Image: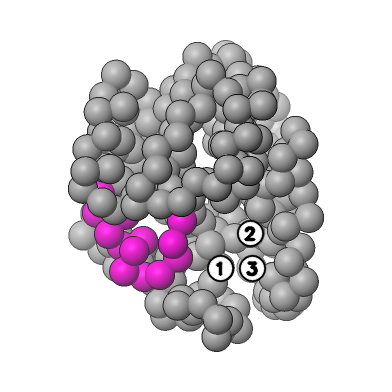
Amino acid sequence: MERGNMNKPWDEEFEVWRNSFLEIQAKDIEFSNLSKAWMQKAVDNKFSYQFDWMGVPIIQMPGDLVIFQEIVWKTRPDLIIETGVARGGSLIFWASMQTLCGIDGKVLGVDIDIRDHAKRAISGSQFNQQIQLLQGSSTDLDVFDEVKKFASPFKRIMVVLDSNHTHEHVLDELKLYADLVSPGCMLLVLDTVIDDLNVDLDRPWGPGASPKSAVIEHMKSRQGLFKNLPEFENRATLTVAPNGYWLRL
């Protein structure tokens, strides 16, 4: 198999064998309920804040990171756009995945407030020439014009939405950024798990008003353009992105 070919597994017999267990796992209600209960405790205890990527904090679930790696390997994006920079670890992760997968690419991070610690972390990284930062609201039309201009030379564009998690903001992001995703590449809408968790009264988002509610609403009008890939969330299980993995057709 050629590197990155997503249509033919390395070992077809093994692929069939493990997929049979994935089907069992996906239908296991007890396992699903245990996973949801564990996820609630993990969020309560700030579990996803406990990890670094190449020395920089990365606020993600470990299982999702493995899935992210698979997605880069299989779909080979030469540009990854992520809204939400936080501490910079995710941008470094994406750049490192491109490099490991032999992709000559770039990563663009968009955030309304890019903190100095994130700038220092990225500038001190070996991937600093690969990562571009753009400060401003991801839904500001002038900022989005800059994103489109930056993205114009690239052929395989992937988008990751992980900034403000309110329904309205994510829906506005989807209306802009979904069209940038190249056919055969992925749109990731993160923190859709908010819909499955107890409400945090200190946040303006929660069940029914979250990235999940936004992506469900948006995709009603995008049928035939995007396909939800539940196998990714089913395998990660402890994921921040249920209903969040979308393939551009």
Q: Which residues are magenta?
A: 163-176
Question: Upstream in the sequence, badge 1 or badge 2?
Answer: 1
Badge 2: residue crowd in 10 Å (few <14, some 14–19, many ≥20) = many
Is residue 214 rendered to the left or right of residue 241? left
Which mark's residue is nearer the viewer, 3 or 1? Answer: 1
Residue receiving disc 3: 27
Residue at (26, 51) in percent of width and height: 140
Q: Is residue 209 visible?
A: yes
Q: Amino acid at mark 2?
A: Thr
Considering only vertical position in the picture, is 10 above or below 17?
Answer: above
The answer to whether residue 208 is above or below residue 3 is below
State the residue position of label 1: 193
Tag 2 residue:
239
- Which kind of residue does numbered mark 1 sit on? Val
Q: Quadrant of residue 48?
A: bottom right
- Is residue 171 on the magenta stretch? yes
**Secondary structure found at label 1:** helix
* Picture coordinates of residue 33, whole percent (x, y): 70, 77
Q: Are marks 1 and 2 in contact (CB under 8 Å)?
A: yes
Q: Where does residue 193 sit, x and y in percent of width and height? A: 56, 68
Residue 9, quarter of the rendered image:
top right
Give the CA distance from mark 3 to mark 1: 19 Å
**Residue 197, horizontal then vertical, whole percent:** 59, 78
